[in-house]
Amino acid sequence: MNFFHKKTTLNFNTIATKVKDFQKKQYQKFAHNQK
């Protein structure tokens, strides 16, 4: 159970990081288009 929990947390952190990177790129694209 503990191993499964660690694995799930790791996957969640990876997804969260990818989402943050994606949002950052989208924001930069948006900011660039606003100029």
Image (cartoon, helix red, strand yellow):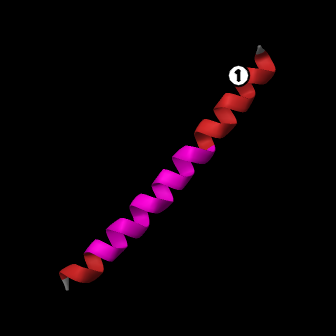
Q: 10 above or below 1?
A: below
Q: Is residue 28 rendered magenta in the image?
A: yes
In the rendered image of this protein, does residue 19 appear above or below residue 13? below
In the displayed orientation, state which residue is furthest to the left. 34
Say left or right for 2 vs 32: right
Please, what is the three-letter code of the amino acid marked with disc 1? His
Name the residue: 40% across, 59% down. Answer: 23
By secondary structure, the bulk of the magenta-drawn segment is best described as: helix
| Direction bottom: furthest residue | 35
The magenta stretch spans which residues?
14-30
* Image position, residue 24 (x, y; %): 41, 64
Across and down, in percent, residue 9 comes to 65, 31
Number of numbered discs: 1
Pointer 1 residue = 5
Residue 16 position in % (x across, y down): 52, 45
Q: Residue at x 45, y 61 (%)?
A: 22
Image location (x, y in percent) of residue 7 = 73, 31
Which residue lies most toward the right here?
3
- Residue shown at the point (33%, 67%) measured from the top left: 27
